[in-house]
Image: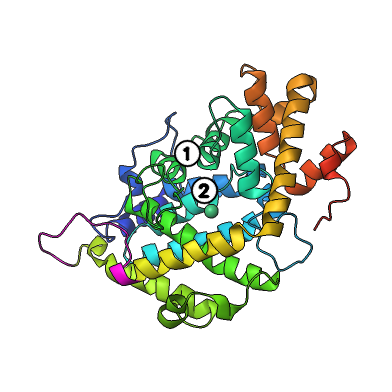
Amino acid sequence: MDLSVVRGRLEAAEERLSPFAARSKASHGRAVPEEPSPLRTAFQRDRDRILHTRAFRRLKHKTQVYIAPAGDHFVTRLTHTLEVAQVARTITRALNLNEDLAEAAALGHDIGHGPFGHAGEEALAECLPEGFRHNYQSVRVLEHLENGGRGLNLTFEVLDAIGKSSKTRDDILSEGWGIPATLEGQAVKVADAIAYLNHDILDAVRAGVIEERDLPLSTRQELGDSHGARINTLVSDIVEASWDATGEQTGAGAAPAIRFSPRIHDVANELREFMFQRVYHYEQTLRDAERGKSVVHFLFRHFVTNPGGISPDYSRPDDSVERRAADYVSGMTDRFAIRLARELGCDDAIGWEQG
Ligand code: MG
């Protein structure tokens, strides 16, 4: 039996998506052409490839906000990633866009995050002359480091959405590192912010940093009083405000985009700014961040001086020693980095509680 009838059926179903949706059959393709999978569309195949990487598994021990937290209920990069995928799938399904593309990009979007969250990213940026950005590193891991250095040969649309998934502080919908070429990529970008704002509130309350009643009045009045209500308001607003992405409305409006209504956009920005001031820049968080940075600096210096210790599984032999050290260190989980730095005599890694 020719199983490719299955892919044919899946691709035919994509024809019923919005005219603005990305279609796997019309993908700009892979760097190296491949025979298609008989059972899956190109985007479904990319999703599976990302899910089966070692880099994806390591997300479970990488920090979201709280560094190597002691409690089992704190969000990690892995659970954050799964929440982003779920929010992005809800948005894209509601707007009749390509859910598989959104899922693939969401699962891969943070795969290049180093240990200790944004602190680790900052430290690596200080180490490398060309700088370091986790979104670019996600693309690098998927294109060049995974699969024994051969990469996963993903489609253009998935890599584009991952590379442009980051935003700057000024606005929840900021262009950041570029506007994704697909609406599905835009959905992942905003789903990332919806997911982290909401789970970071829970974590901050759990850590005793804030209480729910400290949240801005606009958040409580407009988004709701519970975790579920807040996510629901934000996601519903995105779907309504982005409805022209479904192609069901005709008329000469602006090009379809994934957006909030102006009012909820303001509320979400106010909440985001509150989180920066009260949670992300909280004293203890900053102290742990400094410690995480110093561990990353220590490990980077160690491997630049002792390149023989860099695992060939996480670096490319022809790259500069700095690049190889950064690739190796950025792949480490919080706990692996702490343990290794401690063994190598880094003072900042001693006595650090680990989850
Ligand atoms: Mg993220």
Badge 1: residue crowd in 10 Å (few <14, some 14–19, many ≥20): many
Q: Tag 2, which secondary structure?
A: loop
In the rendered image, is residue 83 in sight? no
User: Which residue is painted at 30% across and 43% down in the image?
Assistant: 26
Nearer to the camera, 85 or 164:
164
**Where is residue 118 drawn, in percent x and y?**
60, 47
Rendered image quadrant of residue 147? top right
Nearer to the camera, 211 or 201:
211
Q: In the image, is residue 43 above or below residue 221? A: above
Nearer to the camera, 78 or 167:
167
Earlier along the polypeptide chain: callout 2 or callout 1? 2
In the rendered image, is residue 344 in sight? yes
Left or right of 142, for residue 332? right
Which residues fall within the magenta stretch? 249-263
Badge 2: residue crowd in 10 Å (few <14, some 14–19, many ≥20): many
**Where is residue 64 drawn, in percent x and y?**
63, 56
Q: In the image, is residue 300 above or below residue 171? A: above
Which amino acid, mark 1?
Leu
**Where is residue 100 drawn, in percent x and y?**
43, 55
Which amino acid, mark 2?
His
Q: Tag 1, which secondary structure?
A: loop
Question: Between marks 2 and 1, how big is the CA–CA gap?
Answer: 13 Å
Residue that numbered label 2 is attached to: 109
Residue that numbered label 1 is attached to: 154
What label sits on residue 178 in the rendered view? none
Does 134 appear in magenta? no
Left or right of 130, for residue 93? left
Left or right of 307, for residue 170? left
| Mark 2 or 1: the one toward you | 2
Where the C terminus falls, by quadrant?
Answer: bottom right
